[in-house]
Amino acid sequence: MPSVEVFLACATQWRLDAAGTPQGLDYPALEAVMRMLGTADVRHVFADVQVMEAEVLRVFSAACGAR
């Protein structure tokens, strides 16, 4: 599960707007994490992480809208 491992390793690498709302992952940091973890299939893992990122952003957006 290298995609999940990379995603979890990037837990502190979210870009936030001025209000503190997550806008997405810091892709240069994501690239560094994949390099440090020795990720073999970078393109596949990156695509998987983007799917997870989009879902997290959807959940954050729904939670912010419920306030």
Image: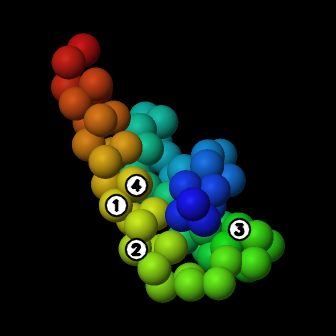
Determine the CA span between mark 4 and mark 1. 5 Å
Residue at which label 4 appears: 53
Task: Indicate the secondary structure of the residue bearing disc 3.
Answer: helix
- The quarter of the rendered structure image containing the N terminus is bottom right
Task: Indicate the secondary structure of the residue bearing disc 4.
Answer: helix
Is residue 21 depicted above or below 55 in this figure? Answer: above
Which residue appears at 24% of the width and 14% of the height?
A: 67
Residue at which label 3 appears: 33
- Residue 26 position, x and y percent, is 55, 63
- Residue 48 position, x and y percent, is 41, 67
Describe residue 25's horizontal placement relative to residue 61 as left or right. Answer: right
Which residue appears at 48% of the width and 74% of the height?
A: 46
Tell me, yes or no, whether the two marked residues, 4 and 2, touch with CB atoms within 8 Å.
no
Which residue appears at 76% of the width and 70% of the height?
A: 37
Task: Name which residue type carries label 3.
Answer: Val
* Residue 10 or residue 41, whichever sits in front: 41
Tell me, yes or no, whether the two marked residues, 1 and 2, touch with CB atoms within 8 Å.
yes
Task: Name which residue type carries label 2.
Answer: Ala
Q: Which mark is residue 47?
A: 2
